[in-house]
Image: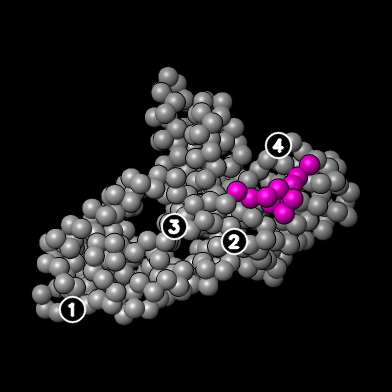
Amino acid sequence: MFTSPETTPAKRLKVGISACLLGIEVRYNGGHKESRLCSQSLAGYFDFIPLCPEVAIGLGIPRATIRLVGDPAAPQAEGGHMPSGPMSEALHTYGQRMAAELPDLSGYIFMQRSPSCGLERVKVYQPNGNPADQGGRGLYAAAFCAAHPDLPVEEDGRLNDPVLRENFLTRVYVYAAWQTLLGEGLSRHALTEFHARYKYLLMANNPLQYKALGQLLGRMGDEHIDALGSRYFSQLMAALKKCATRGTHSNVLQHLSGYFKKSLNSEDKQEVQHLIEQYRLGVIPLVVPLTLLKHHLRRHPDAYLQRQAYLQPHPENLSLRNAL
């Protein structure tokens, strides 16, 4: 029988976060940039690990502001009370150290536009005093992410977008499921079962990669399972970064409805099709046709469909699909 996280308690996941986003007063001016989404809504599901690299390397509170300068692809930090070279190296080293000390994170939320923590579009100033057209990445974030390239990461501001928020949190829970699988022991059978569980989620986010990953597992050959698993998972996480659309969600909903073609009467089938079309047209949110399909699944159980992560990829009480 299909069970939701309301009846099966969700495991609390460890997620890294820029400390200022939890209301901790670590910013250059002694303030914070609390995100209530993080400090209130998500704190009920995650064990946040708050970090502030600027404080960690000794810049103090309050402190002079720092900024990035030079080549946007390899910027340096300047400002504060440390010389540019040592400060840049300290932020880089701290990122590597935290990446090594926190291998069990399932995701990371960074402070946007920060010269230490920003993921993209961070201003990198040129000799003429103007920022380069091409933005850079914060020095700490760059080092941390380089050590964990598959880890789901996002900036706080982008989480205000319901599509980006749902995409990020879905990837966090997929990453955590992979960590659990590795802990239990990876095998060819376990890898195949994992892929089957995430079939429709992948189809919704990235139909082309859904086919490519299926082909990858279809020709496993004699490749060592650890190498194969690493290659598969990296491609899976890259594929899931692409956000699902109403069109791709509708396609998956049609696939799911096909499992009930022999069990529903014509009136029930028409209702399902009507709601899928209403969703595709933007009249209703995704949660509406999904709720109906899960209702029919409870009445007409199907073992394969019941284990599909697509039906509930994250705790139901987060209500993420109410806004899609």
Nearer to us: label 3 or label 4: 3
Q: Main secondary structure of the magenta part?
A: loop
Asked if the residue at tag 2 contacts the one at tag 4, i.e. Cβ–Cβ closer than 8 Å, the answer is no
Amino acid at the residue labelled 4: Tyr
Q: Residue 144, how many percent across, how many down?
A: 32, 53
Nearer to us: label 3 or label 1: 3
Q: Is residue 201 visible?
A: yes
Answer with mark 3 or mark 4, whichever residue precedes in sequence: 3
Q: Which residue is mark 2?
A: 44
Q: Which residue is at the far top?
A: 222
Answer with mark 4 or mark 2, whichever residue precedes in sequence: 2
Q: Is residue 215 visible?
A: no
Q: Which residue is mark 3?
A: 49
Q: Residue 182, how many percent across, how many down?
A: 49, 34
Which residue appears at 54% of the width and 31% of the height? 184
Amino acid at the residue labelled 3: Ile
For label 2, the SS is helix
The numbered mark at residue 304 is 4
Range of magenta residues? 1-11
Tell me the CA gap for discs 4 and 1: 57 Å
Seen in the image, is 83 located left or right of residue 9?
Answer: left
Nearer to us: label 2 or label 1: 2
Q: Residue 239, how many percent across, how many down?
A: 46, 48
Tell me the CA gap for discs 2 and 1: 42 Å
Camera-side residue of 134 and 116: 116
For label 1, the SS is loop
Which residue appears at 45% of the width and 21% of the height? 221
Tell me the CA gap for discs 4 and 2: 30 Å
